[in-house]
Amino acid sequence: MLILRSVSENDLKDLFNLSELVMFINLPADQDIIESKIHSSLQAFKKPSKKLWENYYIFVLEDTELNKVLGVSMIHAQHGTEDEPHFYLKVGQEHKYSDTINTGFVHGTLKLGLEMNGPTEIGGLVVHPEFRGSKNKLGKQLSFVRFLYMGMFPERFKPLVHSELMPPLDKDGNSPLWEAIGRRFMNMGYHDADILSRSNKEFILSLFPSENIYQTLLPLETRNAIGKVGKDTEPVKKMLESIGFKYTHEVDPFDGGPHYRCELKNITPIKQMIRGQIKHSDFNPNKAVEMLIYLPHDGYDFVAAKLPVFVSPNGDLHIDRSVEETCEVKWGEVSAAIPC
């Protein structure tokens, strides 16, 4: 059985192994950093801080038969504070016209901006390479479990939800935008700058151009990459757009990847969330709907699974009793479910 749950200390080895298979800034191949992230997440699930920016929630997808973590996703309750602002490049236009020569141009522009009271951010979604393309749509489950959790506990998050998507990179994993702008002003590689920015953002404000950057002056390859996503990220972009997220006309100042946002209350799965008591029973499968459902029990702070759910006329959420073989569900407790 596949379950989605809050991370535990026992997941350290699996997450470290996963980090060695993928290059992802939120899951570095460093056991000490991963262990620290796990401890932070455990604290957030049990007793979240009133300082939302301190709360990181990590979800893992586990195959209980293999006893193995197949993927991970994360929520940062607030991205952007006075001490660590959220930086972005605003994508705009500037009109130029000369009466003398009767000629005008519309120039694409980029301008550095920052936000010190930022939104909730979803990110850190990684699926084990061996299990990508599964008919069970593991990436979608890992993405949607965050919406289920935020829908159940909206008070733990900001009213606006933010997502940053990966742009197309060159064959060496470098960003065309960074090579055209960032490297010239900061004298370091793209990945080094990205890592440094996770703990110290002062250098961005001090060294990055503060006025309009004219896209006309950038190489064609760079201009074509701004606000675009890489091939592997296309499904994520389509999924976000299908549930209410919209492009903000802002991009990452390092790699030019687009930023998407949606009000938490308007995210489609959250709008469609159903609450009710969880029951086990035999029911006609034709009357059930595949949903991501919260499974209340004593083992972890949060557990969910994608299962056929029958919603009774009185609002109870019925699932097959066989689930109990894997999870000791506390039947009769209030649960919640979203389409997935």
Image (tube, grey):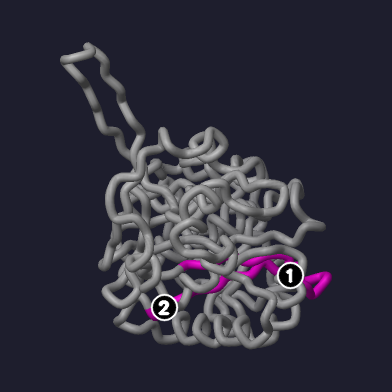
Q: Which residue is mark 1?
A: 18
Q: Nearer the viewer, residue 301 or 218?
A: 218
Q: Inspect the image, locate mark 1, and give the three-letter code of the amino acid beneath it.
A: Leu
Residue 271 appears left or right of 221 = left
Which residue is drawn at the image coordinates 47% and 39% (left, top)? Answer: 218
**Do we see residue 132 in this rendering?**
yes
- For marks 1 and 2, the one nearer the N-term is 1
How would you rate the neighbour count of disc 2 (Cα within 10 Å): few for under 14, some for 14-19, many for 20 or more? Answer: many
Residue at 31% in and 64% down: 118
In the rendering, which numbered label is found on residue 339?
Answer: none
Question: Is mark 1 in CB contact (under 8 Å) with mark 2?
Answer: no
In the picture of the structure, the residue carrying the numbered disc 2 is 55
State which region is magenta.
54-75
Mark 2 is on which residue type? Answer: Asn
Is disc 1 surrounded by few (<14), some (14 to 19) or many (20+) residues within 10 Å?
A: many
Query: Does 67 appear in magenta?
Result: yes
> Residue 338, can we see it?
no
Give the answer, above or below, for where 243 lies relative to 126.
Answer: above
